[in-house]
Image (tube, rainbow, N blue to C red):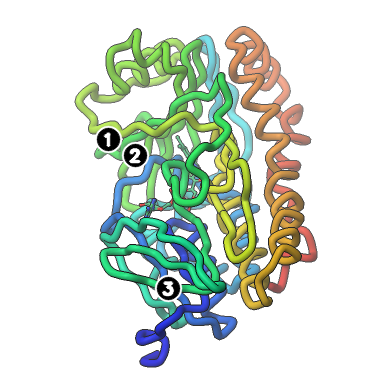
């Protein structure tokens, strides 16, 4: 460990200590690489998120040896999804997912990385210097040098992809975590309400607080006057219990986007920094962890275009291929009338959701298992 802390040139610098960065750092350190993990925030930090880890995310964690972690943190097993639109609610069975606060989850992943030997520095906004003779030069409140650079800087990150391709119809993300009396929103159920201006998801966390996460059209937020009012309007239209209007909401930039490049000689983007689509199906952390799990082995190889190409291929296989059903569901949600019809059909025939649920909970491919 002492040798790692004093490394003049790190094998790997990971920028961003969310799930993508922390799991990359953890898995790379376990392979014997010297790793520095850097984040501009001080943890726990506020992160807009639905806080649901689905079966894909849980199997990706298991693939890197962290399968027990959600359970140890008291994650809440989720057994039902209540989908509401136009005053109707369909309740569907849900298996294999849990809710867990980002404070607890992200903190535990960072601890796993440091326990594996990674060095972690928080409260340092990283700026890119350049690359010289195969070594990256970073400014992280002091110079940091590394042979490989992993951009895990999330949706807001601009480290290696200053100009992501943002969908012209992308919605804005928003969220809050509140103390909300038990009753209306029960533990173990994911509540999803869809309306004309967007949708709102609610779930109880392990400590009893209510996590609220939403995607709104920018015009809906402008017309409503605030994120809280935008959520209120969607919940009322869906026919769901409303929330206190003084909740401390936080917003995100437009959600659906992709980076122009996700790899090059000596660098890789992973997690939201590589690309993201609307989060209705709660998959982002699964993509982040599965991506990190498939990236880590490549970091041990000599860098070059062949390794960058290998990461592009792995990313297509383990992340992009899984995003298609999410895009399809997001499209249905954009048509409120169609969404109302879907809820009506599911009220009478919940099994109709089976193929979609099975697709979303499809296990990892064999190539990722056992990494
Ligand atoms: C409304 C909403 C609901 C969602 N619901 C779910 C859900 O239920 N389930 C699910 O699986 N996913 C969900 N997601 C997606 C999920 O939150 C993300 O996909 C996930 O956090 C991506 O992890 P990441 O590590 O790539 O990025 P992040 O978790 O965003 O971490 C990036 C980190 O990089 C740091 N950083 C950025 N720039 C710099 C810099 N220059 N220097 C140093 N550090 C930097 C940031 O401080 C941050 O800590 C939701 C997202 C939204 C917006």
Residue drawn where x is 55% and y is 85% of the image: 32
Q: Earlier in the sequence, mark 3 or mark 2?
A: 3
- Is residue 282 positioned above or below 151 on the image? above
Residue drawn where x is 38% and y is 40% of the image: 48
Q: Position of residue 15 (x, y in %)?
A: 43, 60
| Dot in front, 1 or 3 | 3
Q: Position of residue 125 (x, y in %)?
A: 31, 56
Residue drawn where x is 66% and y is 27% of the image: 329
Which residue bears the numbered disc 1? 180
Q: Secondary structure at mark 1?
A: loop
Quadrant in which the N terminus appears: bottom left
Query: Is 85 situated left or right of 174 in this image?
Result: right
Query: Is 57 situated left or right of 110 in this image?
Result: right
Between 214 and 80, the one lying in front of the other is: 214
Q: Earlier in the sequence, mark 1 or mark 3?
A: 3
Which residue bears the numbered disc 2? 210
Query: Is 285 situated left or right of 39 in this image?
Result: right
Q: Is mark 1 within 8 Å of ligand 1?
A: no
Residue drawn where x is 56% and y is 19% of the image: 169
The answer to whether any part of residue 159 appears in the image is yes
Mark 2 nearby-residue class (10 Å; few <14, some 14–19, many ≥20): many
């Amino acid at each position: 460990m002492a040798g790692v802390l004093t490394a003049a040139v790190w094998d790997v610098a990971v920028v961003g200590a969310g799930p993508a960065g922390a799991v990359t750092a953890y898995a790379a350190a376990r392979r014997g690489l010297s790793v520095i993990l850097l984040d501009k925030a001080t943890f726990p930090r506020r992160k807009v998120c639905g806080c649901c880890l689905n079966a894909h995310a849980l199997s990706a964690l298991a693939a890197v040896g962290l399968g027990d972690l959600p359970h140890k943190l008291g994650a809440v097993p989720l057994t039902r999804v209540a989908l509401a639109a136009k005053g109707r609610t369909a309740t569907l069975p849900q298996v294999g997912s849990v809710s867990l606060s980002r404070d607890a989850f992200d903190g535990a992943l960072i601890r796993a990385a440091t326990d594996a030997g990674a060095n972690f520095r928080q409260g340092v906004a990283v700026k890119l210097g350049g690359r010289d003779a195969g070594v990256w030069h970073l400014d992280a409140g002091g110079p940091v040098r590394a042979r490989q650079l992993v951009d895990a800087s999330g949706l807001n990150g601009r480290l290696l992809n200053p100009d992501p391709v943002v969908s012209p119809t992308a919605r804005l993300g928003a969220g809050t975590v509140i103390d909300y009396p038990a009753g209306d929103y029960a533990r173990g159920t994911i509540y999803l309400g869809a309306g004309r201006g967007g949708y709102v998801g609610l779930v109880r966390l392990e400590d009893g607080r209510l996590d609220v996460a939403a995607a709104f059209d920018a015009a809906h937020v402008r017309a409503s006057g605030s994120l809280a009012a935008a959520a209120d309007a969607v919940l009322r239209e869906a026919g769901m219990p409303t929330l206190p209007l003084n909740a401390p909401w936080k917003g995100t930039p437009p959600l659906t986007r992709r980076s122009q490049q996700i790899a090059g000689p000596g660098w890789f983007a992973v997690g939201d920094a590589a690309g993201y689509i609307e989060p209705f199906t709660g998959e982002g952390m699964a993509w982040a962890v599965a991506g990190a799990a498939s990236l880590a082995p490549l970091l041990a190889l000599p860098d070059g275009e062949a390794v960058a190409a290998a990461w592009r291929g792995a990313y297509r296989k383990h992340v992009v291929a899984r995003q298609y059903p999410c895009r399809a569901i997001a499209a249905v949600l954009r048509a409120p009338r169609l969404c109302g019809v879907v809820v009506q059909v599911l009220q009478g025939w919940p099994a109709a959701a089976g193929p979609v649920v099975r697709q979303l909970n499809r296990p990892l491919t064999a190539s990722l298992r056992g990494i």
